[in-house]
Each structure stands twice: as C-alpha cells, then as structure tokens.
Amino acid sequence: MHRAQVDHEQALAGVVAIPVTPFDTAGGVDRVAYRALVRRLLDGGVRTVTPGGNTGEFYALDESERLLVVELAVAEATASGHDAHVVAGVGLDVATAVREARRAGAAGAGLVMIHQPVHPCVSEEGWVEYHRAVADAVPDLGVVLYVRDPLLAARAIRRLGELCANVVGVKYAVPDAARFAAVSRDAGPERFVWIAGLAELYAPAYWAMGATGFTSGLANVAPHLSLELLAALRDGDFGAASAVRERVRPFEELRAERGSADNVSVVKEALAQLGHCRRDVRPPSHPLDGERRRRVRDAVADWKAC
C-alpha cells in the first residue's frame, strides 16, 4: 500500500459528509451559517467533510465561492479541536481543476475530490489523462476519484493508480453493487480506499463488497444516524445497519426522486425546518413546494434532535 493511502485511509474510511452551502438573504454564501453547519457535523462526530461536493451545489458556485467554502471548512476544522479532514471538491476543465486543487492545498485541505469530467465525449484514455493532470499538479495532496460512469473500465482506475501514487481513494457512485464489486476487485481492492458514493441507502450493499466508507448529505441533518450506520457496518451487524437504513429511507428516497432533482433541496428544507439555514438553492435546483416540504417534515419526524 502506498504511503499516501496509509496517511489518508483514516479520512476516507468512514462517513464522508458533504456540507450544504447555505445562502444569505442577498443570495451569497452565508459564511456564518456555513461554519456553524460544519461545526455541527464535527461536534456530532463526523471527521471528514467535502466542501464543494454535489450536495454543496458545486456547479452552481463560482470559482471564488468554491474556494471560499474550502477556506471556511478548513478554518472550522482547525478551530474545532477535532482531528478533522477536509476533502475539497474540484473539477470542470483541466486548467480550472488544477488551479482550484492547488488553491485548496494552499488553504489547508489535505485531499481533493475530482468531480467526473463535464464533457459529452469522454474516452478512457482521456479520463486517465484528465485525472493525472490534476493529481500530478498536487503531489502532496491525497486525490479521490469520483466515478459516476457505469461504463468506466476498472483498467482505467488501475492505470491511474499506477501513474499517480497520490490517488488514494475512489468514490464509486454507480447504482449497481455487482458492478462495484467487479470494478473494485479488478482495479485493486487494496490499492484504493473504496467509498460508497451513493450514501446511506447503498452503503450496506457496497460495504459487503469491500467499501470502507460512504458519503452522506443526510449527515447535515442527523449526523448521529450516519454514524450509527457506520458503527453497525464496522461491527458486521447488518441487522442493525438495515434498521438504520429503514429509518432514513423515506428521506433518501425523497432526495432521489425525479432523477435526484430535489437532492439538495430536501436537505436544505430539513435544515431550514430545524432552524440551521435558509432553504434557498440556486438554479437548476429549486425549492420544494408545500407538499414536498410536508413529506420532509414527516420523514424526519422520528429522528432524535442532534
């Protein structure tokens, strides 16, 4: 196992929370609310946060805002006194991804997560070169791949691992546990830290196939439930894991409806109902209507306050 993997395994083998990006009344990033939300995650027991993830509306933020949320997350992680890790989301064109990865490192992030390339024509060789360009630009940072393409071959991930020692993790977000098992086995189950990238509903199945961490937007609302699931999985208690999964299933299924159209809106609505931030989201997301707000309220009604 590469040294970089050993250094960052603790950060990725657990709950990898994706903070929302709260907006103020003028539509800008609410810095105070953002830090409070990150602190709430850390005080709740989460130790890894990814500013600039999809739940953080990465594609709706401009470049200065994407850097800002990384800086705010690092500042709060440092001030919290917890042994916390920041994984900064980067992406878009190669030059932007490289620039933002370097800035994230300078801001204090220890890892970057590279969003899947935004391009209608992605070749396997080009996928490798895209990620290699970013990884080579930040050799002192751990790099996490974000895989959403069901057609991406394991050999591409394996090849990138051979070329870049600092590529330490794979966030696998293809909704197919059998595919995940095959890809992780063929790419290298020991070479990378494998993260179930589809959150709590998929975590048990992916855990059984070799994942040792999972991402979570739900943790913004109820970090204790995400951590309960993690503890059950680590103990090999799939009965307890299934019980937690059932508790959160209505909430997560609401997020997944209509092709995940309301993924972020559902989380922000729950946080707004709890008084932690405004429910505002940016286009192409949209705030929930009254019926969906009621469904969010019902979905979290039996969750303990945290």
Image (tube, helix red, strand yellow):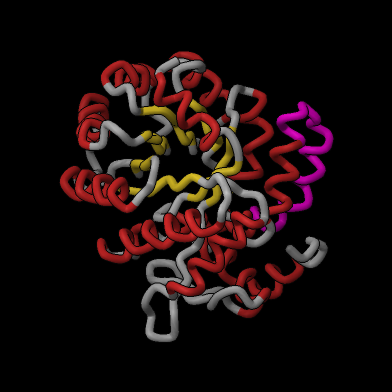
Which of these two is toward me, 166 or 146? 166
The extreme bottom residue here reads 25
x and y, in percent, of residue 242 in the image: 78, 39
Q: At 58% from the left edge and 28% from the top edge, which residue is drawn?
A: 211
- Residue 255 coordinates in the image, percent (x, y): 59, 58
Considering every residue shown, the one lying at the far left of the view is 95
Residue at x 45% of width, y 66% of height: 21
Q: Is residue 68 above or below residue 105?
A: below
Q: Is residue 263 visible?
A: no
Residue 3: x %, y % from top left: 41, 21
Q: What's the magenta bit mostly, secondary-structure-wise?
A: helix
Give the magenta-colored segment's residue range. 232-252
Q: Is residue 108 left or right of residue 276?
A: left
Q: Left or right: 130 with respect to 166?
A: left
Is residue 115 found inside the magenta-colored segment of the image?
no
**Residue 176 position (above or below residue 289):** above
* Horizontal side, residue 70 vs residue 260: left or right: left
Q: Position of residue 128 (x, y in %)?
A: 26, 27
Q: Nearer the viewer, residue 101 or 290?
A: 101
Instruction: Left or right? Give the position of 114 relative to 280.
Output: left
Residue shown at the point (56%, 65%) measured from the top left: 37
